[in-house]
Amino acid sequence: MSPKQTNILLISQDQQIQKSIKALLSNFNGELDVKDHIDESDIALDDSDNNWNLIFVHTEAQKKEALQVCNRFKSRKPLLPVIAVSKDPRPEVAAECLANGADDFIGYPWNNTECIARTSVAIKRNKEITRLLNGNSAADTDLEASSTLSETPDSAIKTIGDVEVCQVNRKIKVAGQLLQTTQTEYTLLSYLIDNIDRPCSSVELLNDVIGYRDKNYLPSLHSHICRLRRKLKDSKTTYIQTVWCYGYRVGLYNS
């Protein structure tokens, strides 16, 4: 396989979406693997031979199963980007997908320019992480490679109280324990820590971190923050503080 080739998996029964994704792939040098049925017993999503750079999951026809697929991917390969696609663009649908492991959400039909841009960002991020982890068997062992932060240079780790954020493996430890987080959850916490001296507005986080310009998607931000708070519950030092009617910031207990 050429090192520049892009491999995308699409899970969808919808012929229109399949056609649109195939057209989208013409903008990249790669191949498309289409699965039109989600079946826990034989879909073989865990095959280590599958060198996918990105996964599209259509959430309509088999919504429950599709969301389970998002979670299943993230539990095995947390660095592999998953984009949920839906013909129902309501914010609550987007929020549910994002809360269940999807890194992004795109309503269909979509604006081609925006979809290409979002796809490019996801693929670029995946390939950059794969390059950084190449000495540790790259993307096919990203969970194993990221299971410890101790092998990472100190300059790549941000420490806030008992929370460690690794910029190379994009992983988080709380009180020495590795957290299972989505890329969006990691990016949100990392952004808040980078700006620990000030509160970040909800609109800023929505625009600059999650990538949405429409305020109707604010519920998806609040969903991510809620999940992060649950995952930080074991921290004795660090928490996410709500700045009333404005946004969020990282806080330290007894500070």
Image (cartoon, rainbow, N blue to C red):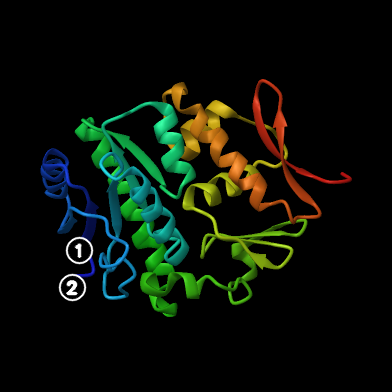
215 and 97: which one is in front?
97
In this figure, what is the number of numbered marks?
A: 2
Residue annotated with mark 1: 5
Left or right of 242 in this view: 54: left
Q: Is residue 228 left or right of residue 139?
A: right
Q: Residue at x 49, y 75 (%)?
A: 144
Q: Residue 108 bears which disc, if any?
A: none
From the top left corner, tell me how far across and down residue 77 is, in percent. Answer: 42, 65
Type of the residue with mark 1: Gln
**For residue 147, above or below residue 103:** below
Q: Secondary structure at mark 1?
A: loop
Residue sitting at x 58%, y 72%: 152
Q: As drawn, is 113 to the left or to the right of 183?
A: left
Quarter holding residue 163: bottom right
Residues packed near mark 1 inside 10 Å, few (<14), some (14 to 19) or many (20 plus): few
**Is mark 2 in CB contact (under 8 Å) with mark 1?**
yes
Residue under pointer 2: 1
Frontmost residue, 113 versus 93: 93
Q: Position of residue 64 (x, y in %)?
A: 37, 46
Amino acid under disc 2 = Met
Marks 2 and 1, how far apart in space? 7 Å
Q: Quadrant of the N terminus?
A: bottom left
